[in-house]
Image (cartoon, rainbow, N blue to C red):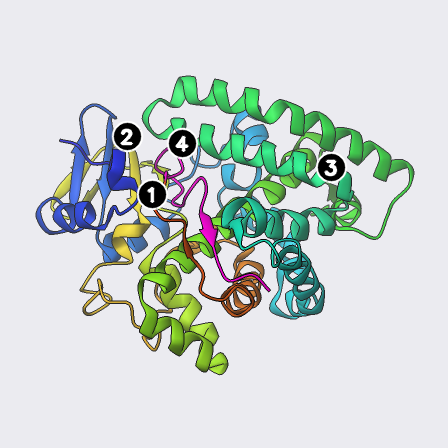
Amino acid sequence: MRTFPAGSELLNPYPFFEDMRRNHPVAFDEQAGLWAVYRHADVTAVLGDHQNFPTSTIEEGVLPAPEWRRLFSLNAFDPPHHTRLRNLALRAFTPAAVARLQAHITTIVDRLIDAVADTGRLDLVGDIAGPLPTIVIAEMLGVPAEDQEQFRHWSDEVGERANALVLDPENGVRRLSEALSPMEDYVRHAVAERRRQPKDDLMSSLLAAEIDGQSLEEPDLVAFCMLLLIAGNISTTHLIGNAIRVLLDHPDQREHFLAHPAQMPGAIEELLRYDSPVLAAPRWIRHDYELGGMKLQRGQRVICWLGAANRDPEAFPDPDRLDLTRKAARQVSFGHGAHYCMGAPLARLEARIALPAILQRLPELTLVEGTQLEPVPGYLLHGMVKMPMEFKPA
C-alpha cells in the first residue's frame, strides 16, 4: 500500500491524506517498511509518547550513536537528556526574548522588500521567504553577513537530503552526512574562535553553558549550532511561502487578514493548520503497541503525517475550509510533545511581520502567468522551490 503522497500530489497532498485518514488511518507500507499514521488523535498520541516512540534508538536509557548525534543533535535525544540540552538554548526562544527581536526583524523585512519594490517582479522564496529566517537565526548565532547566503544553500541541501531518511535510512544517513560536512567544518572553526574570544551571540552562550555541571562536548555543540541554523531557516521559509499562496487563493480571507491585525496570531495558527510547512515526523517503535486496531512491533518505524492530522475533521470541523477566525491552536505543524519546535515563537513572529508587509507593499501580487510551481522534494517538508511573482511596482 502506498502511504506517501507523490509527484504533483506534493503541492496539494490533502485529498490523498483525506482518503488515507478515512480508509487506512494506520497503515503499513511494505516497500518503505514503516507504519503511517494520519488521524490527529493518533499523531498526537505517538508524538507525545517518547517512551514507546523514541526519535533515534529503541534501547531505553542508551544515548544515540555518535553519528546519529552528529546528524540530528537535539532531535537525536529523548528526555531526560533532551530536556537538559533543550533548556540550554530555550532562553533565546522564549516569547519575551523573541519579542525583543521585533523591530530588527521588521527592518530586515523592509530591506528585503525595498530591494524588489521597484522591479514589479520577484521570486518570493529566493528574495524574501528564504533570506529572512536565514538572516535572523544566523545573526543570533553570530554568523557574519557575508556567509549567510552560503548557510542558506547548505540548509536547503540538508533539508532535501533529510527526506531520503524516511524511505532509505541507510543511504539517507550517508547522503545527509555528506551534505552536513561543509557546514560542520565552518561551525567547528567558529566555535574554536569563540573559545579564544567570546562574543555577544548565541554560539558563545552555548559554549559557556553547562548541563549538570558539565559543558557541552564539542561535537554536540557543533551539531546543536547546525540544527539551529537549519531548523531556523527551512520551516519558516515554507510557512511564509505557503501562507502567501493560500491568502492569494482566498481573497476574502486575505482582506480579513489585513483588516484585523489584532487577530493575526490566531490567523497564523490557521494558516499553519491549513497548509503545514512540515508534513511529517518520523519515530521508532520501542515496544509492541496497538494503535488504531493495528499491531505495531518493536524495532519498526512510524511516520506521523502532520499535514493529515491538521485536516482531521474530528479535531477541526470543516477542515478543508480556510477560516482565519478558527481556533486552531491544536494544529501540529510545529510538532507535539517533548520535541515541539522550540523555535516556533520566532517563526510565528517572522510570519506576523512578513506576511502583511508583503501583501501591503507589493500590491496586486500574483503568480507569474503560466507558472508551474515545483514542490520541494521529499516528504518531510512542504513548500515550493520557487515562487515567481509579479506586482504593481512602487
The residue at 17%/49% (across/down) is 15
The kind of residue tagged 1 is: Asn
The residue at 23%/67% (across/down) is 321
Question: Marks 1 and 4: in contact by CB < 8 Å?
Answer: no
Which quadrant would the N terminus be assigned to in this image?
Answer: top left
CA gap, disc 2 and disc 1: 11 Å
The kind of residue tagged 4 is: Asn
The kind of residue tagged 2 is: Gln
**Disc marking residue 163:** 4
Q: Residues within 10 Å of mark 2 (few under 14, many from 20)?
A: some
Residue 13 location, x and y as percent? 25, 46
Compared to residue 63, the image places residue 292 above or below, namely below
CA gap, disc 3 and disc 4: 25 Å
Question: Marks 1 and 2: in contact by CB < 8 Å?
Answer: no
Please state which of the two labelled residues, at mark 1 or mark 3, is closer to the viewer: 3
Q: Is residue 340 visible?
A: no
Relative placement, left or right, of 248 versus 294 is right
Please state which of the two labelled residues, at mark 2 or mark 1, is closer to the viewer: 2
The kind of residue tagged 3 is: Asp
Image quadrant where residue 93 sits: bottom right
Please state which of the two labelled residues, at mark 4 or mark 1, is closer to the viewer: 4
**Disc marking residue 300:** 2
Label located before the other in sequence (2 or 4)? 4
- Label 1: state its secondary structure: loop
Image quadrant where residue 187 sits: top right
Relative placement, left or right, of 107 versus 336 is right
CA gap, disc 2 and disc 4: 18 Å
Q: Which residue is mark 3?
A: 147
Label located before the other in sequence (3 or 4)? 3
Q: Residue furthest right?
A: 197
Magenta region: 374-394
